[in-house]
Amino acid sequence: MPKHYRPAGKKKEGNAARYMTRSQALKSLQVNLNLFRRLCIVKGIFPREPKKKVKGNHHTYYHVKDISFLQHEPLLEKFREIKTYQKKVQKAKAKKNEELARLLLTRQPTYKLDRLIRERYPTFIDALRDLDDCLTMVHLFAVLPASDRENLEVKRVHNCRRLSHEWQAYISRTHALRKVFVSVKGIYYQAELEGQKITWLTPHAIQQVFTNDVDFGVLLTFLEFYETLLAFTNFKLYHSLNVKYPPILDSRLEALAADLYALSRYIDASSRGMTVEPKVDASSSSQSNDRAESELRLAQLQHQLPSSEPGALMHLVADKEVEEDEETRACKSLFKDLKFFLSREVPRESLLFVLPAFGGTVSWEGEGAPFKEDDESITHHIIDKPSAGHMYLSREYVQPQWIYDCVNARIILPTEKYLVGRIPPPHLSPFVDNEAEGYVPDYAETIKRLQAAARNDVLPLPGVGKEDLEDPQNLLYAGVMSRTEEAEAAENKKTMAEREKQYHEELKKELKKEVTGSVVDDVAAPVVEEGEGEESSVPDAAQIAQDTADMPTLMMSRKKRKLYDAMKIGQKKKSESVERIKQRKKNLKADQ
């Protein structure tokens, strides 16, 4: 009998034992496809790609251990219980027993995903690492309209909006925002919490339209899990500031759709041990409103008492401020002592999030604003189109792009290019490394020089590269080095050049000895002249460099060589695109 002979019906081995298809998984779990997808999403189980697909390439494969975990999942039994209960409701409706159906709907079993959050994310850092898609999804559904056709309820949209505003309020309060970029898709943000960089995308404040090529059933399942994850994260973050969660907001500001400003006021008041008293209009001073406001104030007073000793909350806030790093301090003081006023046409929610995150004081046009437009202490008026109203000489009127460019550059940029009515400079992405891409835009060079001027650093003049700064003679002309230092640096540079030249000569001699001392074949070689034989036997430096560069490629496997060739093709395309941009720029300058 062969060594690897396996009789029929015996235990499987290899990929056949480690993986199973989706059809086999559905049969094993005895669930339909929708419920299986739902379980995989909330449990974090995804398809695998085995090296050898036993059942063929047209199947989706899952790990056998993942499916065995699903078999013992308590949530699976809860879903089966809900499905059975829904059959009772349908049966009551079919018998036209509306009272029984209404009673059954009020007692319908529910489930929570709290246990799965603690299971998938054992530590808080794990949850922060997986927060990018969560924030993008929650911010997307926060601006979508409710739809019965897509089973998107108003309550869920309001919950997404509340969670997104709570997250933005914490990021703004702790000055953890690092990068902002406005694109066609939306606005990209990047924050840094506990050493983890979190990037998310928020859509523009325009009317969103549902599309037919998107399966909203799958998205709503992801959203259900992400809502729980973000609620857990906000709870942890707010309690790190010793602030009660969920926050109790000013009802007047909530009615005016100023949730983010209300959250900021609540966090500031909670961290200082104060109460936020909502302003009451004379027309709305009825008995019911007074009772609601008194209950709100009483709840705020109860939740803002320190947990242990009277000064515990202040000590916690002070400790937080001591632990701030250098970048956080720079972000906190970027717009310090500056007051901004937002016009109606600018993206208000985005600027209300960005400006306080970098130390600025902001107000807007409308009810509930901290200060009015005619305040003389306003330094900058953010406006996107020329206004026919009163223009104040004590403030600067700039476009919203100036805010985002200042945030990414970490300096206050000149406002001449951002004045109202002018075409602003290009909005550069802070997520792109210009040095790695091989092309640095002109405005990026300008910003770099402004940053160097703010730090009092030395940069090369326009048209001079960084390698020219290594020349001591240029540094002497620039007044950076003294004559003694210049002579010493020139001597060191000359010594290094001589050593490099000597090394190359020795390398050529060794190569010449290896070629002349090699074994000659028995076949008679043609007779050549002495000088010609030396030239042909000794390869030139270009050939040596080419052979040395090709040696690692020859030692690669076929798979790695193909991957390396693909990388070279990508680099060639990148260099060609850079050359096209440079040529286009050259042609534009020539036309001007």
Image: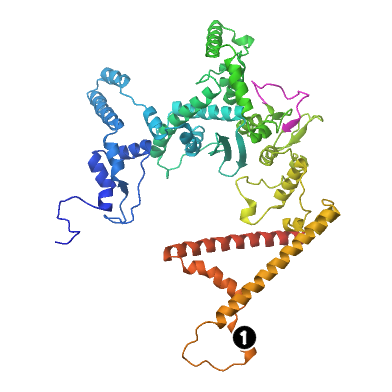
Q: Quadrant of residue 256?
A: top right
Foreground: 551 or 582? Answer: 551
Whether residue 541 can be seen here:
no
Q: Position of residue 116 (x, y in %)?
A: 37, 31
x and y percent of residue 226 in the render? Answer: 44, 33
Callout 1 amino acid: Glu
Q: Please say whether residue 445 is visible from this viewpoint.
A: yes
**Residue nearer the viewer, 298 or 461:** 461
Picture layout, residue 365 above or below residue 583:
above
Taking 410 as reference, is 362 above or below it?
above
Quadrant in the picture for the C terminus: bottom right
Side of 427 where 46 appears, left or right: left
Give the residue at x 63% y 34%. 347
| Identity of the residue drawn at 72% across and 61% down | 586
Q: Nearer the viewer, residue 111 or 233?
A: 233
Residue 291, compared with residue 270, is above or below; it is above
Total numbered labels placed on residues in the image: 1
Please, what secondary structure does the residue beneath circle 1 have?
A: helix
| Spot occupied by residue 547 in the image (x, y as percentages of width and height) | 55, 72
In magenta stretch: residue 374: yes
Q: In which quadrant of the rendered image does the N terminus lie? A: bottom left
The residue positioned 28% from the left and 52% from the top of the image is 15
Magenta span contains residue 134: no
Tell me if mark 1 has few (under 14), some (14-19) or many (20+) residues whose alpha carbon lies within 10 angstroms of its own: some
Residue positioned 58% across, 26% down in the render: 260
Q: Find disc 1 in the rendering and name its residue.
A: 534
- Range drawn in magenta: 363-381
Left/right of residue 568 with respect to residue 365 in the rendered view? left
